[in-house]
Image (tube, rainbow, N blue to C red):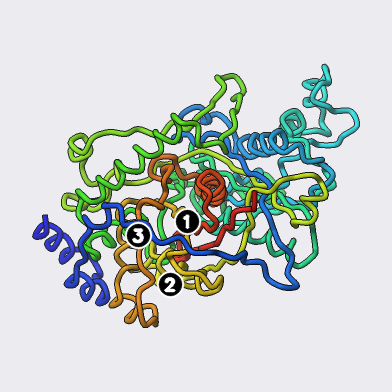
Amino acid sequence: MTSLLTYTFKNLPNTSKWAVQFFVRPLSCSSQLRAAPAAQTKSKKTLAKPNIRNVVVVDGVRIPFLQSGTSYKDLMPHDLARAALSGLLTRTNVPKDVVDYIIFGTVIQEVKTSNVARELFTWSHPYLSEAHSGLRQYCTGSFISLTSCVLAALGAGFSDKTPAHTVTMACISANQAMTTGIGLIASGQYDVVVAGGVELMSDVPIRHSRKMRKMMLELNKAKTLGQRLSLISKFRLNFLSPELPAVAEFSTSETMGHSADRLAAAFAVSRLDQDEYALRSHSLAKKAQDEGLLSDVVPFKVPGRETVTKDNGIRPSSLEQMAKLKPAFIKPYGTVTAANSSFLTDGASAMLIMAEEKALALGYKPKAYLRDFVYVSQDPKDQLLLGPTYATPKVLEKAGLTMNDIDAFEFHEAFSGQILANFKAMDSDWFAQNYMGRKTKVGSPPLEKFNNWGGSLSLGHPFGATGCRLVMAAANRLRKDGGQYGLVAACAAGGQGHAMIVEAYPK
């Protein structure tokens, strides 16, 4: 296997010097898959800071994350987002007029609802209501579009006086929604913010070609029949070629899977290591699902279909079955396959975030404090997926903590190879000194504290929604196990990354 990886790595395009240097210093991967000894529990203090408001998460929910092309395939992104928000309203009973602001993350935007956060409200037209028997009659009227009527009928029920905006930051879009909300509350601008995210990969927007779009726009401006005929005469069949959205880096034109394959090779992460880690993720997720630990999942009655109650991508297999799959990106010698990669996912999540004093005044018992956070960015070519490695030591230093202080780690699993490469980078003094400007390594997370209820490989990864899932998993794990600090981290397209400290709310 080592010789195979060496051959693969040497034949990959644009091999970087840092990767070559690291490749000749491989770290044992098998040690990463063995549980490390538990760290000594220290007497921990709260991370509250003087003169800064404490920000808490009251609760958070998500609709089941489903493989694209399954039960959500006929819906729209705002349908999923609205279901998550409705679930949050039901779970928390928060008065609708108490919410000051709503922020949602998404990546591949539906052009009709580009500000999906705002399209979640019940429209307040006096002639329309969900119970109105003449709904279809009004929908056919010239003054109301069918889309508006659907939004009115299926709206989550927030006040139309509540402002909302949508953010996008690739796989950390929901993280950005949350931290924007934290900033608004900590600064005293607002007391109550709903943050969340949504992604619908079952129906991504496909555009006409640029030539076709240009002709259509010019036809729309043409004033005479002669001008229109002149434009139509320039039409060619190749104008009909569609433009498909690509899950690829704009700056490098490289798919994320290709980057994951190169990263795994650079850090000497074997195919077996990746498959073992993926099997771990699915096995833990199945155990958590069976034991009812995934309490953030709320049921969703899909219009015209069944009620969905659980994630459908959790599928523990066997190493023998996984080994039969062919490489998905670099062929024939790559190590990233469909089995050790996160799958295209539809889903949405939402969280109720408040100033602590406001939450207590409303009678809530918060789940956790949302503490320090950082964003990082590095080379999108060779270090695209190393966001957790760069963000983790920064957020720990900001909070005055060490890895031993963390009781629950929740990292986004884009690929098994990505997770294991981050483990190796975090556990390398050489990498810390040569590429992070640090004297010593931060250390890799012990597996007995890491993604104990599964991760994106098994639960799924709706690009815009995963951040909220990570935070709620950390908060719920701390609450169940009696820990105090959780660390959430994720990588994202563009070579970016995020990390946040979650502190359990005292019982």
The label number, if any, that marks residue 349 in the structure image: none
Hey, what amino acid is under mark 1?
Asp
Query: What percent of the width, then of the height, locates residue 438?
Result: 39, 81
Q: Secondary structure at mark 3?
A: loop
Distance (Cα) linking label 2 and label 1: 28 Å
Q: Earlier in the sequence, mark 2 or mark 3?
A: 3
440, above or below 175, in the image = below
Q: Earlier in the sequence, mark 3 or mark 1?
A: 3
Hey, what amino acid is under mark 3?
Glu
Task: Name the residue tied to disc 1.
Answer: 407
230, above or below 121, in the image = below
For the residue carrying disc 2, how many other residues have a C-alpha within 10 Å: few (<14), some (14-19), or many (20+)? some
Task: Name the residue tied to disc 2.
Answer: 378
Drawn side of residue 493 relative to residue 205, left or right: left
Do the residues under discs 3 and 1 have CB atoms within 8 angstroms?
A: no
Q: Secondary structure at mark 1?
A: loop
Task: Name the residue tied to disc 3.
Answer: 254
Query: What percent of the width, then of the height, locates residue 130?
Result: 79, 25
Hey, what amino acid is under mark 2?
Gln
Residue 341 appearing in the image:
yes
Query: What percent of the width, then of the height, locates residue 41?
Result: 46, 60
The residue located at (32%, 51%) in the rendering is 416
Q: Nearer the viewer, residue 499 or 333?
A: 499
Which one is in front in this view, the residue at disc 2 or the one at disc 3? 2
Residue 388 quadrant:
bottom left
Drawn side of residue 276 relative to residue 355, left or right: left
The residue located at (53%, 58%) in the rendering is 485
